[in-house]
């Protein structure tokens, strides 16, 4: 039976798993079950990133993720290569941003040809709520990273996974203002029942998923982020960062050969559709 597929429009956003699935913590809801000893997807070298960027002419924005990107010893060289080509965002837990790294990021924020955005993941506006998911000491370490970024003039966005965000957004804004952030910004990420979230609450039900009528709607390739993006790991190119552990969604080895219609028959695709979620926006 043919798979449900989505037309591809153009390459707007490129995701690069620069640290693979290696992370310094193991969050209870991690979409890719990353952790300190998890190497299903290995790190990418700066040379590998430069090579794949040469295959992505015209991309508007690049997001560096993992795992924890700042575990990659070549992260600054990777950042420089990406910033020469497009706006860059980094998804981080903030715990690895010490003073030298904050200074390096501040310099690039001020001087690079394209915009640099740092997004720090938290799961609560205080240690009790955050560390219950991210591990003891994670909140204090992340606050240190945020504080050092603010000192360098870089105001990070805070990314939070959970439900009913309107009840908590002002708590995050207050926390960020107290840290000197002049324009607090919070990005809410809906729970996807993949990775470690399966163990916490079970996977998707059999009825959850997209249907052909939805995919055939004219706005579908823009409503689903995979209509204008691709994700690169050491294993190849996937439609999005959420499905890098689904072998049937591996599209190819090079980005340029994967800019074609792609499957959207994973139940997680319905979460993007229903919430209007995009990893980048």
Image (tube, rainbow, N blue to C red):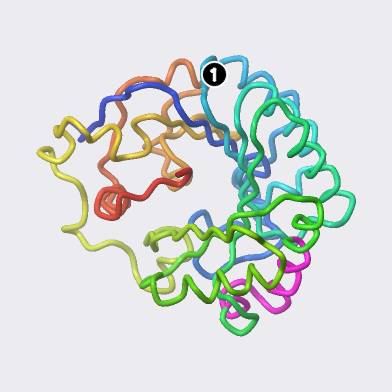
User: Which quadrant of the rendered structure holds the N terminus?
Assistant: top left
Whole-percent x, y for residue 16 in the image: 59, 36
Q: Is residue 71 magenta?
A: no
SS for tag 1? loop
Measured from the top left, where is residue 195 in percent x and y? 46, 59
Q: Is residue 87 above or below residue 197?
A: above
Q: Is residue 78 left or right of residue 261?
A: right
Horizontally, residue 45 falls left or right of residue 280, namely: right
Looking at the image, the residue that sits furthest to the right is 100
In the depicted view, which residue is nearer to us: 9 or 281? 281
- Residue 12 against residue 99 in the figure, above or below: above
Where residue 82 sits, quadrant-wise, is top right
Disc count in the image? 1
Q: Residue at x 50, y 21 (%)?
A: 255
Q: Residue furthest bottom?
A: 128
| The C terminus lies in quadrant | top left
Residue 221 image point, x, y percent:
28, 32
Question: Which of the two residues, 82 or 157, is positioned nearer the viewer here?
Answer: 157
Left-right relation of 251 to 173: left
- What secondary structure characterizes most of the magenta part? helix
**Which residues are drawn in magenta?**
130-145
Residue at which label 1 appears: 56
- Of all residues, the one furthest to the left in this rendering is 213
Query: In this picture, is 228 found above or below 138?
Result: above
Category of crowding for the residue at label 1, using alpha-carbon neighbours closer than 10 angstroms: few (below 14), some (14–19), many (at least 20)? some
Name which residue lies at 68% across and 44% down: 19
Taking the magenta stretch, the answer to whether it contains residue 138 is yes
- Residue 201 higher or lower than 180, as above or below: below
Instruction: Please provide percent x and percent y for residue 196.
Output: 48, 65
């Amino acid at each position: 039976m043919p798979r449900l597929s989505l037309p591809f429009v153009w390459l707007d956003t490129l995701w690069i798993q620069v640290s693979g699935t290696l992370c310094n913590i193991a969050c209870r809801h991690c979409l890719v079950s990353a952790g300190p000893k998890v190497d299903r997807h290995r790190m990418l070298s700066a040379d590998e990133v430069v090579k794949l960027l040469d295959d992505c002419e015209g991309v508007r924005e690049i997001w560096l993720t993992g795992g924890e990107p700042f575990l990659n010893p070549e992260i600054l060289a990777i950042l420089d290569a990406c910033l020469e080509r497009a706006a860059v965002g980094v998804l981080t837990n903030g715990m690895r941003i010490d003073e030298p790294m904050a200074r390096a990021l501040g310099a690039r924020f001020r001087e690079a040809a394209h915009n640099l955005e740092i997004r720090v993941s938290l799961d609560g506006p205080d240690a009790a709520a955050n560390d219950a998911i991210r591990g003891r000491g994670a909140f204090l370490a992340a606050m240190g990273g945020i504080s050092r970024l603010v000192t360098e003039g870089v105001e990070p966005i805070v990314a939070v996974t959970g439900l009913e965000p309107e009840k908590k957004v002002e708590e995050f804004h207050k926390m960020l203002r107290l840290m000197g952030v002049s324009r607090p910004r919070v990005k809410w990420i809906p729970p996807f029942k993949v990775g470690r979230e399966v163990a916490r609450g079970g996977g998707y039900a059999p009825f959850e998923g997209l249907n052909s009528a939805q995919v055939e709607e004219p706005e579908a390739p823009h409503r689903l982020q995979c209509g204008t993006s691709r994700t690169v790991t050491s294993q190849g190119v996937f439609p999005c960062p959420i499905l890098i552990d689904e072998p049937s969604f591996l599209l190819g080895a090079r980005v340029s050969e994967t800019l074609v219609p792609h499957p959207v028959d994973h139940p997680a695709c319905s979460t993007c559709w229903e919430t209007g979620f995009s990893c980048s926006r």
